[in-house]
Each structure stands twice: as C-alpha cells, then as structure tokens.
Amino acid sequence: MDLDSMDCTSTIDVTDDDEEIHQDRHSYASVSKLHSNNSTNANAASGLLPTTTSVHELLECPVCTNSMYPPIHQCQNGHTLCSTCKNRVHNRCPTCRQELGDIRCLALEKVAESLELPCKYMSLGCPEIFPYYGKPKHETVCDFRPYSCPYAGSECSVMGDIPFLVAHLRDDHKVDMHSGCTFNHRYVKSNPREVFYCFGEYFCLHFEAFQLGMAPVYMAFLPFMGDETEARNYNYSLEVGGYGRKLIWEGTPRSVRDSHRKVRDSHDGLIIQRNMALFFSGGDRKELKLRVTGRIWKEQQHSGEAGGGGACIPNLS
C-alpha cells in the first residue's frame, strides 16, 4: 500500500469571522535615553544632535536592513554593515567597494548601548521596552509574536495571529473546518488536516504517515492554536480501532508554536504501526480506512464530570 494513497471524507462544516494582521518591521517607534533634558531635546530638534530615529537608522545594516549588533564593521571611509553581511560581500564595502578589513565601529556600538527601544511586536500589543542589546532575546519568546502557518504539507512562510491563520488555512490550504469538541472521522488518504472550533479556541488535527526507523507508521495529534500556557488548560483523546481492538491516546495539546516535525520527532501523539492500521482497516488489508475518534475537554471539566477516570474516552462501537 502506498502511504500517500489515502483519502478523507467528512461532513461537518463551520464558518468563522477572520481578520488579517499586517506588519511593517520599519514602523516601530524608538525610545532613547540620549535626550534626557529639554536642552538636549531642543538641540536634537534643531538638527544639532541626531534624533533617536536617525540613530536607529544608523544601526540598520545597508545590506540586509536588519539591526546591527556587535561586532559592527566599517570600511576605511566609515561605511558600516553587520558581521553576517560582511562575509556575504566578500570583504568589500557595499557602499564604496573599498576593502573592509577588520575595523570595528566601536563608537556606534557604544551609542547602541544607550538606546532603549520598544519590542518590534508593539503594533501587535506588546508594551515592553528594552535596552537595544536585550531586545532580540525578548523578541524570540515574545507572547505577541506572530504564529507561523501550521500547515505541514508545504513549507508555508505565512505568519499572523490566530484568526488570520484560521482564514489562511481555510482559504489557501483548503483545510476542513468543524465546530464541536468531539469528532468521529474516517481517514482514507495521507496527511488530512482539519481545524476544530471548541471552547472558543481552535485546534488543528494533524495526521501523517512517516518512517519510524525502518518501519512505516501513522501518527495523529491535536495542536492547540495558541500559546503553550493556554494549551495546558485543555486535554484531548484520540482513539482508533476495529475488530475488537483499539488504541487510545490522551494528552495535553502542544502549541502550534511547536512545528509538526518537533511534535512528531518527540512521538507526542497517537502512533499506529502500519500493520495495525491495516488490521483496523479490515478487508484485504491493502487499503487504509481508519476511523479516528476524539474529544477535547478542559481539565477541570474532565475531573468534575468523570472523577478523573476514563469515562470521557469515546466509544468506537
């Protein structure tokens, strides 16, 4: 059987409102310690001193347009660029074509130390302000940073907030949308992806075929479309079976900030060996026809209704 010969049938639909977030990395305002009194501000306004914005522009690499961090290089004529681009331009200044050498622009590095700038995700709601050199570390973990498209069928570079990505998955990747916290779907194709709207949040069911060592397997898991801290508020179960046998997985959904490869490589989901999948499929055991049943619940709801037991696990019969 070809791992990619599966098809999917489903009958539940849901629509939702969506909105698009546009970002401009050059639109973020800057805040500086350089102008701490009225006379300094007056001098800056009259052009005697550079404004924070102009200093920030000086710290922008002319090649990649990213902010420069030590070591900041310069040529003999004073043109600067970042260390990453120095290697890309073969040691030639991109502005005057003079040889770069190993000259550091220590003055500009020192000026950068005096700056405080807002997070680049300020327009998405982040209120934080950081020293120039501390800003990149925060931005890698900022709660307001946009999410990457969770679609695993292609290397999609689209980023945005959750409502935007839900619309993107529906319209551009043609992902099926469903409403409800339980599902019972039959999968007969590889890599189907579906989004469920439950408890006012979005969850995307991921199902794929891959090689685990030398053995072909199938894996299903249910990422939460939000941050990890929010994902911990929920649990989910997945169940697959047939002919008197079944496999059950219970777990906490991973955030979509974790790529599907990261989740897959950690084996954090329902893993089905191919021979077992074919057994569940019945018939001549050459065509995959899996029925995956699942449920999403909040932990407190699960404890209150089921006493912490397994009563909430769906029944395949």
Image (cartoon, rainbow, N blue to C red):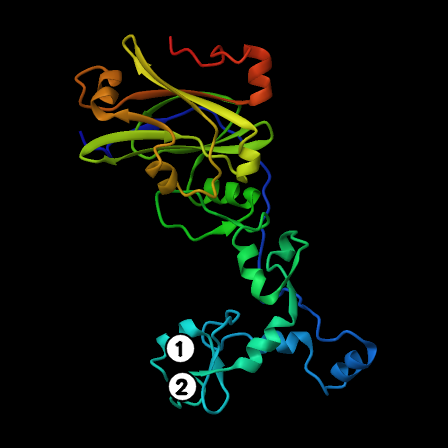
Graded by Cα atoms within 10 Å as few (under 14), some (14 to 19) or many (20 or more), the crowding at tag 2 reads many
Asked if residue 272 lies left or right of residue 197, the reply is left
Residue 268 in the image: x percent, y percent?
38, 31
Q: What kind of residue is marked 1? A: Lys
Asked whether the residues under the numbered discs 2 and 1 touch, taking CB atoms below 8 Å apart as contact, a structural biologist would say yes
Q: Eyeballing the image, is 206 above or below 65?
A: above
CA separation, marks 2 and 1?
A: 8 Å
N-terminal of the pair, mark 2 or mark 1, is: 1
In the foreground, 120 or 76:
76
Which x, y percent locates residue 115?
Answer: 65, 70
Q: Position of residue 119 (x, y in %)?
A: 62, 59
Q: Quadrant of the C terminus?
A: top left
Q: Is residue 93 left or right of residue 56?
A: left
Dot label at residue 306: none
- Element under label 1? helix
Residue pictured at 65% horizontal, 74% vertical: 53
Reading the image, the residue beneath label 1 is 86
Q: Quadrant of the N terminus?
A: top left
Q: Amino acid at mark 2?
A: Leu
Q: Is residue 239 visible?
A: yes
Instruction: Give residue 228's position: percent from left, percent from top.
Output: 53, 38
Q: Is residue 184 visible?
A: no
Front residue of 60/188: it is 60
Decide: is 24 above or below 208.
below
User: Which residue is painted at 71% across and 84% down in the image?
Assistant: 49
Residue indicated by mark 2: 100
Picture layout, residue 147 above or below residue 108: above
Q: 66 left or right of 19?
A: left
Q: Residues within 10 Å of mark 1 (few under 14, many from 20)?
A: many
Q: Residue furthest right?
A: 38
